[in-house]
């Protein structure tokens, strides 16, 4: 439920704690899935969500590519991560639920984790390119 300003004030849900791939409840249709990390045990991280640099597939088609620069090509957020990510390695890749794959940034340190998104989980432009 949301308040008059649109802020979420209540969630109504059930937990299917015994559900897993291949289990008795695997075929169950759900409206959504929530993933969380326990705040008391989590570690903070800066997460850089890179998106497309341009808002159209062919930015120079009309002459001036600068008109199609994506003002939202980088969003920086603070996240709470699993404690095991304190041991993250620069050469490894990590999947963050529902967001994509991430790699440790060169500016990262054990006391200040920084992750960069390398690819999202869904890419509509890539799907279109595969069709042609």
Image (spheres, rainbow, N blue to C red):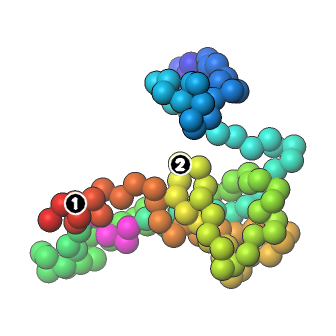
User: To which quarter of the image does residue 34 belong?
Assistant: top right
Horizontal and vertical percent position of residue 13: 62, 19
Q: Give the alpha-carbon distance from disc 2 to disc 1, as whole Å.
A: 21 Å
User: Viewed as shown, does residue 31 lie left or right of 103?
Assistant: left
Residue sitting at 57 percent across and 37 percent down? 21
According to the picture, the residue beneath numbered tag 1 turns out to be 128
Task: Label 1: state its secondary structure.
Answer: helix
Horizontal and vertical percent position of residue 43: 81, 56
Compared with 113, 19 (above or below) is above
Horizontal and vertical percent position of residue 52: 38, 67
> Which quarter of the rendered picture does the N terminus lie within?
top right
Residue sitting at 65 percent across and 24 percent down? 16
Compared with 37, 49 (above or below) is below
Horizontal and vertical percent position of residue 73: 43, 66
Q: Is residue 53 magenta?
A: yes
What secondary structure prevails in the magenta region?
Answer: loop
Instruction: Give the residues drawn in magenta, as a range.
Output: 52-56
Question: In the rendering, which numbered label is found on residue 98?
Answer: 2
Q: Which class describes the residues within 10 Å of circle 2: few (<14), some (14-19), or many (20+)?
A: few
Residue sitting at 80 percent across and 41 percent down? 38
């Amino acid at each position: 439920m949301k308040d008059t300003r649109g802020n979420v004030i209540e969630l109504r849900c059930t937990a299917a704690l015994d559900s897993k791939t291949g289990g008795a409840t695997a075929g169950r249709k759900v409206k959504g899935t929530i993933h969380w990390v326990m705040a008391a045990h989590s570690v903070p991280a800066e997460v850089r969500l890179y998106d497309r640099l341009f808002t159209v597939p062919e930015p120079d088609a009309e002459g001036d590519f600068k008109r199609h620069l994506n003002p939202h090509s980088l969003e920086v957020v603070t996240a709470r991560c699993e404690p095991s990510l304190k041991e993250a390695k620069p050469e490894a890749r990590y999947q963050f639920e529902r967001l994509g794959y991430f790699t440790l940034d060169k500016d990262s340190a054990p006391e200040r984790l920084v992750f960069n998104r390398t690819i999202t989980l869904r890419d509509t432009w890539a799907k279109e390119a595969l069709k042609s």
